[in-house]
Image (cartoon, grey):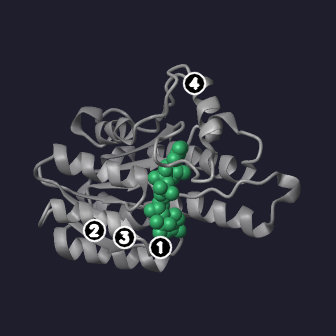
Amino acid sequence: MSRSILITGANGALGLSIADYFLSREAECRVFLGVRERRDKAAELAARFPGRADLVTLEVTSPDAWKAAITEIEAKAGSLGVLVNNAGLHEDALLANMTHGQWSSVLDGNLNAVFHGCQAVLPGMMRQRQGRIVNISSLSALTSPAGQTNYAAAKAGVVGLTQSLAKESARMGITVNAVCPGYIEGGLPADWTPEHLKALKMQLPMRRFARPAEIAAAVFFLASPDASYITGSTLKIDGGLL
Ligand SMILES: NC(=O)c1ccc[n+]([C@@H]2O[C@H](COP(=O)([O-])OP(=O)(O)OC[C@H]3O[C@@H](n4cnc5c(N)ncnc54)[C@H](OP(=O)(O)O)[C@@H]3O)[C@@H](O)[C@H]2O)c1
């Protein structure tokens, strides 16, 4: 089966790994790597799969950017088969000190972006009466750590959106699921010290962070024909932390 897949935030640690996973395991698929300013790593990956991977400029908070990206993808590859809403950001602060800017940029980049993305791809998926949407939430949606009121609210919102949309779109052959990763190697803040990382690992039952491919594998499964009866689900992937 030949299908096209759009992964947002595809220059980041997890987005790259998800793109690589699809390209390496599904010979027929064509992957569109959603990028913003930074695009070096996505371009390297695309160069390894000539003719099967394209970079597409996509600022996920902008409905107009979504419209342009979907028009470009449909012109090149027909209707989109899979959307992975992966782009995201966090700006941690205690609520008492949190600026309105920190609150709204995190809500916008993690939650409103998923709304815009789903709305942009649904018409095409409804026309073809099939489609797969996988939303990357976070363990923070389920554990709500201190210092992350903005991020925890946004990612919990993604879980709620996923469950509601799954009910709305199931009869049209579209599945919508969420994945909640714990700590991922390569995707942690650069200013965390080795001592802090070591102490963090000691709190994890597996004593290690997730490899990005261990999250990508679950996304790939949820987008596969084998997952045809799974919709509205939230899969935590945290090495047993919660
Ligand atoms: N890392 C973890 O431990 C962890 C744990 C749980 C959940 N997650 C979630 O997993 C997803 C991927 O995270 P990651 O670890 O791969 O982070 P990352 O390396 O920082 O990558 C995030 C990507 O999202 C893009 N992005 C952010 N805001 C965007 C916007 N408004 N429009 C377009 N692109 C935007 C970034 O683009 P630029 O390169 O242009 O900035 C970057 O490519 C996120 O949703 C994150 O919340 C991560």
Q: Nearer the viewer, mark 3 or mark 1?
A: 3
Count residues near mark 2 (Cα–Cα under 10 Å), then give few for <14, some for 14-19, many for 20+.
some
- At which x and y percent is residue 120? 41, 67
Q: Are the residues tagged 3 and 2 within 8 Å (C-beta)?
A: yes
Mark sitting earlier along the chain (3/1): 3
Q: CA distance from mark 1 to mark 4?
A: 34 Å
Mark sitting earlier along the chain (3/4): 3
Q: State the quadrant of the C terminus.
A: top right
Q: CA distance from mark 3 to mark 1?
A: 13 Å
Which residue is denoted by mark 4 in the rendering?
204
Q: Amino acid at mark 4?
A: Leu
Which residue is denoted by mark 3 in the rendering?
39
Which residue is denoted by mark 2 in the rendering?
43
| Residue occupying image coordinates x 59% and y 45% | 160
Tag 3's secondary structure?
loop
| Residue occupying image coordinates x 65% and y 60% | 107
Q: Are the residues tagged 1 and 4 within 8 Å (C-beta)?
A: no
- Residue 228: mark in rendering: none
Q: Nearer the viewer, residue 154 or 128?
A: 154
Which residue is denoted by mark 1 in the rendering?
59
Q: CA distance from mark 3 to mark 4?
A: 32 Å
Tag 2's secondary structure?
helix
Tag 4's secondary structure?
loop
Count residues near mark 1 (Cα–Cα under 10 Å), then give few for <14, some for 14-19, many for 20+.
many
| Residue occupying image coordinates x 82% and y 51% | 94
- At which x and y percent is residue 230? 37, 33
